[in-house]
Amino acid sequence: MFKRVLVANRGEIAIRIIRACKELGIETVSVFSTADKDSMHVKISDRSICIGPPHPNKSYLNISNVIAAAEVSHCDALHPGYGFLSENPSLVEACSRNNITFIGPPLKAIRLAGNKSKAIDVMRNNKIPVIPGSIGNVPDIRHAAKTSRQIGYPVIIKASYGGGGKGMRVCNNQRELENFLSLAISESRSSFGAEEVYIEKYIPKPRHIEFQVIADNYGNVACAGERECSIQRRHQKLIEEAPAAVLSPKDRRIMTDTAIRAARSIGYQNLGTIEFLLDANNHFYFIEINTRIQVEHPVTEMVTGLDLIKEQIRLAAGQKLNPPNPGASFGNAMEFRINAEDPQNNFSPNPGTIGECFLPGGPGVRVDTFIHSNYTVSPFYDSLIAKLIVWGKDRKEAIDRSSRALDEFKVEGIKTTIPFYKKILKNQRFVKGQIDTHFIEEEFGV
């Protein structure tokens, strides 16, 4: 096992990693920007090192500074969390050059997953169902138009290195394709530094369901169940739940087996998430691999009893998958991303100083956060300030308990998404599980 781990992140995920390390008897070193010098993750780690000014490019995204912090503190491993450098191949290479174990999948898997069109091609070649679309990237409008005619409109343009809805455009005809292709390429260039885009058949109103795979360094692969992430706004997840209410035992078994095959097909190691879209006819299609711990991993932990961060650390240290089968899930869990945003003002970020802060509790309620009374939410980082995770013996109890917990959750001084989630829990389509990725847009017009 590792002696000392550098936690190369901030906020709630940094705290989550530090806690897991402490329970494994591992020392922790946190990094922080000058804006985060008083943050909770700095206070609870064994040691902390400033890696730069507030702007992420000069601190949390600065590989040289992160590696220097690991070296000077004699860390033998590094956990990247999610976001920032978590899926950056250059960080993995830098760790290798400096004899620091990267707690995550191998470089090859991260590179493959980072190029979505290549990942789709690999899955297609391994008989994993994929959405009909271009073979690789489309270099120009001529190829884009030919592909679109072959698969039929509507189609969607996607950035090969994309995420979060950036570089995506839905096209209902060739005129829209001609208008949107250059826009998607431009957005991909500005957001991801690459102009590669590909085209897929657009699936209207799908459900977004992802499977948590766990793989050791010896060829053993298991699946810890699925999460439904269909409650999204502009391709950004808001509420996640486990298990997915729509899946029959047979469909769940088939999709689980497919997720494991997908992981095996690329020799995957450590934790990863295989993401699918499920259409109205219960046909599912691979869309991407996430090669990091997910924001929504606690819902899986709540229904399986696993500690996924500890699993990451153990696997990176060379331990075998234990148990080989993580076990059946029990009950239902939901996660609500509490963001410092104003739902009444187009969900615009709302940083500022928190006044009174009260976190909910009670049976089946967990809050992962770094905020407290008088904490100042910085404008430099993502607006996520807390995650409310709730468990119930069934989906109804999970919804009822979530409603109670949201009523208790008080964050004064800034706007948050808490009131918006209260409205969702009262929506009958949501209560009945009749959801898809367009639910927010259709029910709330945002």
Image (cartoon, helix red, strand yellow):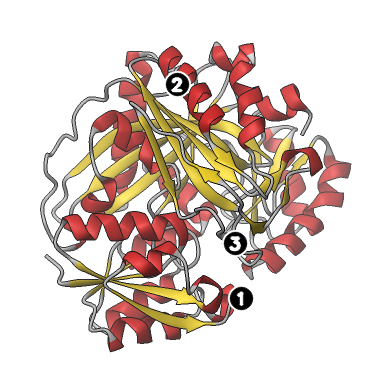
- Residue appearing at x 46%, y 55% in the figure: 370
In the image, what residue type sits under mark 2?
Arg
- Residue appearing at x 29%, y 88% in the figure: 72
Q: Which residue is mark 2?
A: 401
Quadrant holding the N terminus: bottom left
Is 159 drawn above or below residue 391 in the view shown?
Answer: below
Q: Is residue 364 left or right of residue 335?
A: left
Q: Is residue 147 left or right of residue 392?
A: right
Tell us which disc is closer to us: 2 or 3: 3
Q: Position of residue 431 (x, y in %)?
A: 55, 14
Q: Which residue is mark 3?
A: 376
Q: Is residue 71 left or right of residue 189?
A: left
The residues bearing labels 2 and 3 have C-alpha atoms spaced at a distance of 29 Å
Label located before the other in sequence (2 or 1): 1
Q: Position of residue 272 (x, y in %)?
A: 35, 48
- Describe the element under mark 3 as helix, strand or loop: strand
The 10 Å Cα crowd at callout 3, few under 14, some 14 to 19, many 20 or more, is some
Q: Which residue is mark 1?
A: 55
